[in-house]
Image (spheres, rainbow, N blue to C red):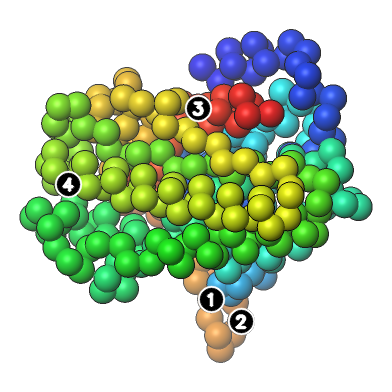
Amino acid sequence: MLAASLTAATAPAAANGDFDRVITLGDSYASGIGIHKHETSYDDHGPDNHSFWGHLRLGASTCKREDDTNHGAQLASWLGVPQQLIACGGAETAEMANQLGNASIPGNGDRTLIVITIGGNDIRSNDGKVWPEVLERCILWDFSCEKRWKNQTGNFSTITNRVRDVYTDIVNQYPAATLRVVGYPEIMQRSPGCFYVTGIDRNEADWVDSQIRSLNSALVSGVNQARNNTGGDIEFVSVASEFDDHGACRKASERYVNDKVLGYTYKRTYDWNTHQVTHHYNYTGLKTSSSSFHPTQKGYDAFYRAVKASL
């Protein structure tokens, strides 16, 4: 499917002459996590010296960048320009200044397309859990998790403020750049039930998707505020129509979002006494992969189509 989409995209388009580079910033939904079953299969886990500092979320072993087939790479191929993939799995809004500072963007950002997905890892439940922890709790432990107060998100307004500041900072530094904020897909999309995701019933699936709609609404508010503050070329790119009826609740041939994925895992640890980095490649057994509930390659193809249509 990817090869076909890239071939079709080689025809000249009005936007093709407008950009010299694509910069992809953000979290796992930008880096390409979900494309591979095995965490060991990604192109880039990053340099060792960036592995253990949260504020340097550039090369942690959680990054798992897929350089060739994420949506940023597809956009760059269509435009005939290079991609700088700086996005990293696990990144939060606090890491965006550092990601942006490590991008090679000349001057005022003229002829630069910046694509970003960020905010999902900033979610905190009422009891302080991050979104992946809430999702895991719903699947494994909490019956009717949608009814429990502890699982509700309590900081959407905070996320709006944080992403607004991120977008504003990007445009203030690079006022001539084009900024596209890619939304998150509704990951479950039951129809009529959610038979292919073990541990999730129809009510929980609807609640999970409602949380993502609320997150996207927070991002839209941040985009609108940043655009009003800066006058920059900032646009929210919804992926709802591209992902419609392609969530994890669908059968494998139809889904653009993975169900739980078992695969070989990868991580790094650091010995503070010896200052040695140890690489842990798990080839001895399959464990839950970070690709779980992330876009498949078809999902990243859908991201590409949505951003392309916005240019």
Counting from the top left corner in percent of width and height, residue 254 is at: 32, 21
Q: Which residue is mark 3?
A: 302
Mark 1 or 4, closer to the camera: 4
Q: Which residue is mark 4?
A: 204
Dot 3 crowding, Cα within 10 Å, few <14, some 14–19, many 20+: many
Q: Hey, what amino acid is under mark 2?
A: His
Q: CA distance from mark 2 to mark 4?
A: 44 Å
Q: Please tell me whether mark 3 sits on a helix, a strand or a loop.
A: helix
Kindly indicate the quadrant of the structure image that contains residue 134.
bottom left
Q: CA distance from mark 2 to mark 1?
A: 7 Å
Q: Please tell me whether mark 4 sits on a helix, a strand or a loop.
A: helix
Mark 3 or 2, closer to the camera: 3
Q: Which residue is mark 1?
A: 270
Q: Mark 2 near mark 1, Cβ–Cβ under 8 Å?
A: yes
Q: Please tell me whether mark 2 sits on a helix, a strand or a loop.
A: loop
The residue sitting at the right extreme is 107
In front of the other: 109 or 103: 109
Mark 2 or 4, closer to the camera: 4
Which numbered circle lies on residue 275? 2
Residue beneath the point at 72% across and 31% down = 76
Res. 65 visible in picture: no
Kindly indicate the quadrant of the structure image that contains residue 12.
top right
Q: Judge left or right: residue 202 versus residue 243.
A: left
State whether residue 151 is above or below residue 144. below
